[in-house]
Every structure is written in C-alpha cells, then in structure tokens.
Image (cartoon, rainbow, N blue to C red):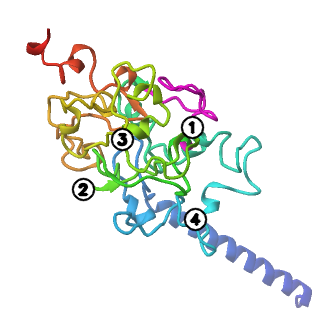
Amino acid sequence: MGRSPGSEKRSFILRNVWRRVLVAALIGVVFTLIPAVAYAYHTDGREGDYDCISCHGDDRDPWTGEGPHGYYTSTTAKCALCHTVHDAPADSILLLPASTITGSCLTCHDSTGAVGPYSQIVARGGTVGAEHSCDTTTYVPGGSAPLPDLLDCSSCHSVHRATQMQPFLRDTGKAFGAKEWIYSNCLLRDDVNDAADGTYTEYGAQWCAGCHDERTDWGTVHNHPVSQVATYTLGRSNDGYTDTSDDPYCQQCHEDYRDVETTFSACLTDYGYPAPDAPTNPEYTAFPHQTESVNLLAETDDDLCTNCHEVSMLP
C-alpha cells in the first residue's frame, strides 16, 4: 500500500532537519579541534599571537586610528566597543561595562586584552608598595584643593583623544606592543584637574603639578620643591634621574623602583624581546600607576638622597 502525499512531505522535512543537525554538529566538532588563538596578551605580560598593531593599527606616524580611543567619524562604529545602549549592566556608568570609569577601563586594560597598568607587578610575583588609588579619593597628596570628582583613569587620560598633550619619549617605548623606542603621549590630558584645554602641553613637573601643585616652587608647602616648568628627558638612560642641577623635577625621585646607579634597561624582556633572561632595571614598568616602593619613589632611604647629595659634599 503506497504512502500518502502528506506522509512523504513529513518524511522529506524530517530528513532535511536531521541533515542540518548533522552538518551543524560536524562544524562544531571542527571548530572545537582548532587551537584557540591567543589574542593580545597573556596575564604574565608576554605577547600572544597578535601584537597591538594587528588590532589597533600603526600609531607611530601617522596613527591609523583603529581601536576605541579617538578618531571618531560618522562612518565608524567605535562607540559600541565601550558603550552599549541596551545591554549595559544595571549599575553601569555612562552605558559602560562597569559601575565606574576605572572598572570599565580595566575590563580591557587587565593584561589580557590590553596593557594592564594595575596588574603587572602582582601578576608577575611582585609586591605593590604604592599606587595612585582610583575610585576611592578626591584628595591628592601635595594638592591645594580636592579633585572635582573621584580620581579615575579619565582624570589623567583623554580616553576619547579629545584634549591631549604633545608626544614624549617614554622610558619603556610603547608598552607591550613595540620593540623599539618611540614617542607617545599616552593619551595624557592637557587639561588636568579641570584646567582649560591646552594648559599642559608637555609632560613634566608642571603637568604633575596640575594636581600636586603644593609640591612645586609655586606652592606654599614646598618639601623640596621641583621646578614648575621642568620637562622630562626620558628614554633608555638615567640622565634625567641623576641630574644635579638646581631645578629638580618630579621624576628624579618618583619613578619605577630600581637602582638608579645602574643603567636604565627597561627593555621589553617580559614581552618577548630581547631574551627572557636579559636584565631589566626596573623590573616592572607600571609607573605612575604602581611601584614596588613606598610613595612611588625610585629608591628609598639615603640611597635616594645620595643620587644628588654626594656624601663627600655634606656639611
């Protein structure tokens, strides 16, 4: 006895359904067997299969503008990299993925998706001695007035690249990404502490004094004041940190914890270049976010003072 047309149709539909289920299952097995690609960077700071330029473009000269920080146009879709209109958590701020700006920044900047400024030392077995404490204070040591809001990443960094200072030669090159020494402004603001745009155009003592104004030679609480106009000579040496001129500046004392008498060698050892057993001085490159030393000092006790004040010259 023959099968009815309705029975034939149901059989055809079932065969197609099972065929699609089987194909989907096979695709899942294939993707399961493909090794996972290590994007960005591992938690110990070493490079993954992709470098910064692979995702964010070459920001040496000129920067092509990939990534979330700046160069927005009507044809880009960068806002959604950080802000989500409908899916933001209930306690989020500004439609960001966390309840604070700093927490939102650290969802990427945790050493797994981008540079981790607050995770390098602990992740690599060190002990944090001091740090700029975000989301907890409006009080700045050596400042004459509280900040307008809680200290967070956007207090120092222009996350949208709206107002920023001139590039400068960093000690450490471009952390994680570059195997060469380049200029960068680290997205540092030129309007720190609610100053007018363009107030701080260069990285130096004046920029730090945007918050720590009582620690400069214009402040009333001097405590060994620094020059309010000094700019930093950085990049692969200790010259700037052992300057014995009459105009000291902040980073002669406050910097990554290290032996100042030893050549500055903040190579990218922990990021795969040069060889992993090459010496580094300092071991970590997290300043000014964190250091191993108290008060974010380059060295401690008399070892710090005698970099400028020679023992033989003491009265």
In the foreground, 54 or 16: 54
Residue 19: image location, x then y, percent = 68, 77
Q: Which residues are magenta?
A: 131-154
Amino acid type, label 1: Asp
- Is 72 on the left or on the right of 21, as rendered? left
Disc 1: which residue: 152
Amino acid type, label 4: Gly
Distance from label 4 to label 2 (Cα)? 41 Å
Q: Nearer the viewer, mark 3 or mark 1?
A: 3
Disc 2: which residue: 180
Q: Dividing the image into 4 quarters, which one contains the N terminus?
A: bottom right
Distance from label 4 to label 1 (Cα)? 43 Å
In the foreground, 123 or 99: 99
Distance from label 3 to label 1 (Cα)? 20 Å
Distance from label 3 to label 2 (Cα)? 23 Å
Disc 4: which residue: 28
Amino acid type, label 2: Glu
Asked which secondary structure carries label 2, the reply is loop
Above or below for 78 versus 267:
below
Amino acid type, label 3: Gly
4 or 2: tag closer to the N-terminus = 4
The residue shown at (33%, 29%) is 226
Residue 4 appears in view:
no
4 or 1: tag closer to the N-terminus = 4
Q: Nearer the viewer, mark 4 or mark 1?
A: 1
In the foreground, 11 or 260: 260
Distance from label 1 to label 2 (Cα)? 30 Å
